[in-house]
Image (tube, rainbow, N blue to C red):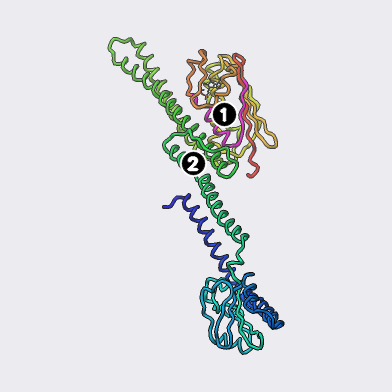
């Protein structure tokens, strides 16, 4: 396959040759259709003028007179009654004057050799340096009839200006060819770079250097390409980090389970220890099960687009149901609950919306101290539904807040080291809110508790 570079150059040379050929054909046709007859007319006129000048003065020395005219830029042939020909000026390339042309002129008629010069000749008649390609008129001198045939001496007509123009065209051709070669190179270079970059990316090498400073379409393409490479690099980093986190989070409980299961095999352990080990194994198994469920949920949420199947659902009922399922935990920690949950319908994905209330409430309870207070408010405006959940638990410091929604993030606060969790709950909450084009904000401070505020826009199309 030919490269784009050679294609571009060949194409340009092709255009130059084709335009030259078309221009030549056009000029040639114009010459045959228009100029040839005019040219013939003009030369007949000149020959007639010469003939009249000769006729006007018998004293004129024909040879000298015609030689002078030839010197000005003409080729002349004079034929007498005996068909003897004398030439003036530079010799014709072809001495092919037909006898009937001589007869015609000697009998007093004009000869239109230029006008009637064969059309088939592709090298235009204008340049055919033949005696047949002349204008002929009769003239009389000292009582004798002659035939005068003339045509311009093309060589003499070609002045320095014509050579300069010719030179100019050649230089133009060479310069434009060099220009095209340079342009093609400039055009191809970034494409070659982009191809190399594509190969680099397919080899998972995301740091690519591209000509992004260009202002043209290639610059734009390079810019988008670099942005894509950066995004791929970021998602590759996230993917590797994710696999790392998942492995780590599965590894720890599995090691615990294995360790305590080994201990259970020992014969000299007390019933108390046995129960404690079994409890640990149970809680670690539960942790693994929750982790697996949450991971599956996150993956399925990731694959959903914004077009989730939406249904009308009562948010107030959902929140009340979630409160009910956490009732035993609330009572266990003796937490007081204040609710303001008026009836509120919303169009969204019911199953995923439930995850928002479930995760936020379970966090508020988990990170509350015994005898704490949790408040839940639901508010409806014309365009939105706002859910606020407030606790007076352990809270977080400012540096932790930006990372809350990262997958596997858990604040390594010594006080909540023993609080079970996976670090996936808020990531799930954020993903569900994003699917509903909503927003979530957090205000929190250490020891003063936290406030999570969810704003969901109403879907006006349903
Ligand atoms: P986890 O399973 O650890 O609760 P989440 O994704 O739900 O995971 O929360 C991430 C981290 O955010 C938690 O580990 C905790 O540090 C912090 N967090 C979430 N909710 C609260 C809250 N109500 N009070 C204090 N810290 C919270």
Dot placed on the residue nearer the N-terminal end, 2 or 1: 2
In the picture shown, does residue 222 fall above or below 130? above
Judged left or right of residue 198, residue 138 is right
Q: Nearer the viewer, residue 43 or 55?
A: 55
Q: Nearer the viewer, residue 381 or 25?
A: 25
Ligand 1 shows up in the quarter that is: top right
> For residue 357, which numbered disc appears in the image?
1
Residue 221 located within the stretch drawn in magenta: no
What numbered label is drawn on residue 236? none
Measured as percent of width and height from the top left, residue 443 is found at 63, 21
Q: Is residue 428 magenta?
A: yes
Tell me residue 282's x, y (percent).
39, 21
* Magenta region, residue range: 423-443
Q: Quadrant of residue 136?
A: bottom right
The answer to which of 376 and 33 lies nearer the viewer is 33
Distance between mark 2 and mark 1 Cα atoms: 48 Å
Does residue 132 appear anywhere in the picture? yes
Q: Which of 292 and 65 lies nearest the eye of the viewer?
A: 65
């Amino acid at each position: 396959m030919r490269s784009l570079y050679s294609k571009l150059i060949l194409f340009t040379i092709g255009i130059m040759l084709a335009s030259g050929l078309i221009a030549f054909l056009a000029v040639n046709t114009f010459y045959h259709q228009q100029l040839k007859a005019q040219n013939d007319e003009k030369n007949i006129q000149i020959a007639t003028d010469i003939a009249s000048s000769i006729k006007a003065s018998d004293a004129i020395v024909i040879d000298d007179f015609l030689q002078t005219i030839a010197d000005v830029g003409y080729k002349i042939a004079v034929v007498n009654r005996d068909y003897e020909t004398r030439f003036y000026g530079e010799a014709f390339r072809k001495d092919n004057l037909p006898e009937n042309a001589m007869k015609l002129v000697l009998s007093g008629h004009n000869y239109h050799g230029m006008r009637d010069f064969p059309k088939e000749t592709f090298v235009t008649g204008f340049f055919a340096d033949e005696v047949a390609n002349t204008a002929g008129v009769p003239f009389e001198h000292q009582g004798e009839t002659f035939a005068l045939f003339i045509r311009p001496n093309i060589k003499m007509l070609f002045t320095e200006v014509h050579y300069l123009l010719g030179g100019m065209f050649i230089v133009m051709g060479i310069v434009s060819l060099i220009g095209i070669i340079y342009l093609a190179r400039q055009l191809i270079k970034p494409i070659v770079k982009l191809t190399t970059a594509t190969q680099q990316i397919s080899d998972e090498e995301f740091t690519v250097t591209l000509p992004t400073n260009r202002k043209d379409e290639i610059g734009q393409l390079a810019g988008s390409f670099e942005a894509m490479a950066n995004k791929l690099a970021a998602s590759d980093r996230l993917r590797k980090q994710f696999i790392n986190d998942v492995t780590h989070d599965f590894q720890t409980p599995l090691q615990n389970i294995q360790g305590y299961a080994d201990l259970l095999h020992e014969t000299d352990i007390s019933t108390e220890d046995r129960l404690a080990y079994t409890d640990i194994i149970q809680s670690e198994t539960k942790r693994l099960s929750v982790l697996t469920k949450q991971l599956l949920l996150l993956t399925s949420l990731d694959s959903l687009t914004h077009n989730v199947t939406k249904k009308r659902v009562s948010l107030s009922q959902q929140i009340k149901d979630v409160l009910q399922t956490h009732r035993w935990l609330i009572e266990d920690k003796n937490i007081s609950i204040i609710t303001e949950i008026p009836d509120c319908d919303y169009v969204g994905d019911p199953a995923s919306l439930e995850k928002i209330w479930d995760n936020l409430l379970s966090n508020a309870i988990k990170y509350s101290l015994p005898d704490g207070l949790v408040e839940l408010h639901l508010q409806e405006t014309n365009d939105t539904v706002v859910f606020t959940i407030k606790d007076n638990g352990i809270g977080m410091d400012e540096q932790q807040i930006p990372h809350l929604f990262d997958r596997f993030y858990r604040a390594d606060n010594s006080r909540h080291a023993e609080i079970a969790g996976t670090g996936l709950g808020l990531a799930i909450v954020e993903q569900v809110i994003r699917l509903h084009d909503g927003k979530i904000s957090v205000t929190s401070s250490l020891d003063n508790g936290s406030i999570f505020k969810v704003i969901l826009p109403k879907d006006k199309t349903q």
